[in-house]
Amino acid sequence: MQIRLYQESDRPFLRRLYLAARKTAFHWRDTSHYQPKDFDRATLGEEIWVAEENGIPLGFVSIHRAEDFIHNLYVDPAQQTRGIGSTLLKQAESTFRTTGALKCLVRNEPALMFYQRHGWRIISQGGEGDDAYYLLHSAAR
């Protein structure tokens, strides 16, 4: 597996991966309105790193660089538990100039456990109902 910067040729595949991963992760939501082009809006202006193996994208992380904020980290649902998410997270952390941050939906317990296992800590909570989230910060630099 290698981690590399996003290329425009990744867009079609990452659109499908993003759609599938969100539908799997947010199982409590009505995801029927989710579309592949949501990827474009969700990553606009962000730095994107792609995990790939044999030329096939397995996942990606997008970072809002001005704030060292991880906006998206998704792995193909069929490829989870292989360490892809951990590798992408480490790549993102290696680019931070300050403490990294991200939001994780409260109901997304597997993701929350993943981040906490990697030393991220809850700083605050916001939102309501299905949109309730935790703000997490990376381990001290």
Image (cartoon, rainbow, N blue to C red):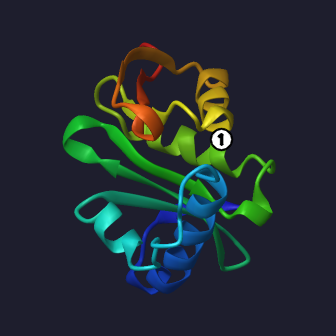
Asked where in the image residue 118 lies, by quadrant, the reply is top right
Taking the spot 33% from the left edge, 57% from the top edge, the residue there is 47
Residue 49 drawn above or below residue 136:
below
Residue at 62% of width from left, 52% of height from top? 25
- The residue pinned by badge 1 equals 86
Residue 93: image location, x then y, percent: 46, 35
- Specify whether residue 5 is in view: yes
On screen, residue 109 versus residue 64, left or right, reads right
Look at the image and tell me in which quarter the C terminus lies.
top left
Helix, strand or loop at label 1? It is: helix
Q: Residue, x 58% and y 19% (percent of image)?
A: 119
Residue 16 in percent (x, y) is at 56, 78
Apparent side of residue 27 relative to residue 140 in the rendered image (left or right): right
How crowded is the residue under tag 1: few (<14 C-alpha within 10 Å), some, or many (20+)?
some
Task: Tell me how many marks there are.
Answer: 1
Q: Nearer the viewer, residue 65 or 113?
A: 113
From the top left corner, tell me how far across and down residue 41 is, in percent: 29, 68
Q: Is residue 3 above or below residue 14?
A: above
Dividing the image into 4 quarters, which one contains the N terminus?
A: bottom right
Q: Of residues 138 and 7, which is closer to you in this image? A: 138
Q: Is residue 130 above or below residue 82?
A: above
> Residue sitting at 59 percent across and 30 percent down?
112
Q: Position of residue 85 (x, y in %)?
A: 64, 47
* Residue 103 sits in quarter: top left
